[in-house]
Amino acid sequence: MGSTGRLSSLNAHRERTVHEASHRRVGRRAHPEPGPARAGRGGDLGVNTRITRRDDDLRSDNFFSAEKFPNLVFRAKRVQNVRAGGFDLVGDLTIRDVTHEVVLKVEGPTAPIRDPQGKRRVGASASTTINRKDFGIAWHRAIETGGVVVGDEVKINIDIEAVEKES
């Protein structure tokens, strides 16, 4: 199955979640099981929060440096804590050429369905929390009332859809 997905939200603001609205292919998998040789890779860093100034800032050197580092990469290493309705997927996440091991909490996959074209589809959701400074994203700005504009903890939510590959 090939997989299509989207980074559905990044929660880095103190009180607000920033949703990415684009839908694009972010990776391919030859097999439905995760493994060490499989990776998800974004083509270009398609940031689209529906607010152009924020999108430009997120793509800038303040955050993702998308021109210099156009890909976010997750390379799966192992599955653990398999349970009804999900599992943990351990792997290496690379942002701005900095790599750290993370654990994605995966819900799913769903039971396969047949789409109108007769292809089998499954879906899953995954989430993890990282510290943005661990990946070299250190921009901050203090606000008058105390605190900062952007928090250090970033919650990453990913929605994944896998579609049966044509033979």
Image (cartoon, rainbow, N blue to C red):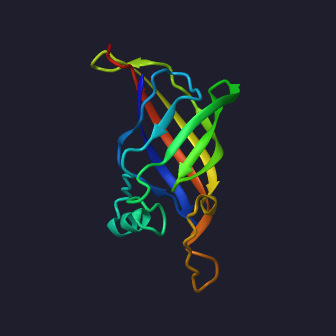
**From the viewer's perspective, is 151 left or right of 22?**
right
Q: Residue at x 65, y 44 (%)?
A: 102
Q: Please state, as top left, top right, bottom left or bottom right, where the C terminus lies in the image.
A: top left
Q: Residue at x 44, y 54 (%)?
A: 19
**From the viewer's perspective, is 104 left or right of 55?**
right
Q: How many marks?
A: 0
Q: Quadrant of residue 33?
A: top right
Front-most of 19 and 153?
153
Front-most of 50 and 42?
42
Residue 16 on image: x %, y %:
53, 63
Residue 29 on image: x %, y %:
46, 27
**From the viewer's perspective, is 144 left or right of 25?**
right
Tell which residue pokes out farthest to the top in this image.
Answer: 167
Tell which residue pokes out farthest to the left in this image.
Answer: 117
Q: Residue at x 27, y 18 (%)?
A: 117
Q: Please state, as top left, top right, bottom left or bottom right, where the N terminus lies in the image.
A: top left
Residue 104 on image: x %, y %:
62, 40
Front-most of 112 and 47?
47
Decide: is 156 above or below 62.
above
Front-most of 100 and 132?
100
Q: Residue at x 48, y 48 (%)?
A: 72
**From the viewer's perspective, is 5 left or right of 50?**
right
Residue 105 on image: x %, y %:
63, 38
Tell which residue pokes out farthest to the right in this image.
Answer: 81
Decide: is 33 above or below 72.
above
Q: Quadrant of residue 132?
A: bottom right
Decide: is 153 above or below 101.
below
